[in-house]
Image (cartoon, rainbow, N blue to C red):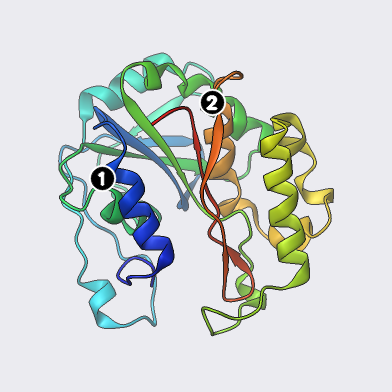
Amino acid sequence: MNAIEENDYTRTLQKFAAALPRPKAILCVSAHWMTEGTWVTHQAKPKTIHDFYGFPEPLFQVQYPASGDPKLAEEITKIVRNPKVNLDDEMWGYDHGTWSVLRHLYPKADVPVLQMSLHIEQPAAYHFMTGLALRPLREQGVLIVGSGNIVHNLRRIVWDTNAKPFEWAEKFDSWVKTKLEARAFDSLVHDAMTAEGGALSIPTPDHWYPFLYTLGAAHESEPVSTIYEGLQNGSISMRSVMFGEP
C-alpha cells in the first residue's frame, strides 16, 4: 500500500529524490523476480506487472510507463561476465518491487529503467559479487536500486501499519544498522541468518538479497547514510539507505 499512500516513508522518498542528480538510467533489483539464472529486462517498453492479489482496486490501476534501455541491458551482459546475465524480451517487466518505489522517486517515469532478477537458488555471496560486478555502471551515471526489506516476515505480520514492532525485528534491524555504520559488509553477507532475530527477519531470502547488490556496488570508502528508518505492521522494516553522496 506504500505505493499509493502518503505517509512518512513515501514523503521521505519524494523529498530524497528531489536532492538527487538525474541518473542516466536506473537498474532495479527487485525481490519479486525470482528466476533460474540472472536476467535483465531488454524490452524498449517494459510492461507494468501487478504481482499481488487481495488489495484495493486503485493499486491495480497503477501504471509505470518508464522506457527500457535495450543497449544498456546489452552492455550489462558484457560488463558482468560472471555470472552470465541473460536478456529478457518477454518474460517480465516492472513488478511492484520496482514501481512501488520508483513512482515516489521519479513520478514522471521519465528515466529509463531496467530490472534485474534474483537467481534465487544461489547463496548470499553470489548476489553480493554480482553487485560488485555491476559497480562500473555507477560511473556511467546509472542509479542501482535494491528493492526489498531488511526485515520481511509476512507470517508474523500485524494488520495495523503502526503496530508495535516485534522485539526480534527491532534487534535485527538495529544489527544491520550497526554493521552498515561499521562498514562490516562481510558480516552482513555471511552472518545475517545467525544474528539475533535474523532467522525470523529473513524467513525466505528474496527480500534480503536485493540489499546485497547495493552492498556489492558500493565503494569501500564512500559514505553510507540512512534515508529512512522505521518498521511497519510489526514485522516489516522500511529502512532505506544510500551509498555515496547525492
User: Which amino acid is tagged 2?
Assistant: Ala
Quadrant of the snapshot with the C terminus:
top left
Numbered disc in front, either 2 or 1: 2
Q: Nearer the viewer, residue 202 or 182?
A: 182
Q: Which residue is mark 1?
A: 90
> Which residue does the image show at 57% across and 76% down from the upper left?
233
| Image vertical order of residue 7 relative to residue 48, above or below | below
| Residue 107 pos. (x, y %) | 20, 53
> Which residue does the image show at 28% across and 73% down from the upper left?
59
> Which residue does the image show at 39% across and 71% down from the upper left?
52
Please say if the residues under marks 2 and 1 sit with CB atoms less than 8 Å apart. Answer: no
> Which residue does the image show at 38% across and 14% down from the upper left?
78
Q: Which residue is mark 2?
A: 218
Quadrant of the snapshot with the N terminus:
bottom left
User: Which amino acid is tagged 1?
Assistant: Glu
Q: Marks 2 and 1, Cα distance to the nearest angstrom?
A: 31 Å
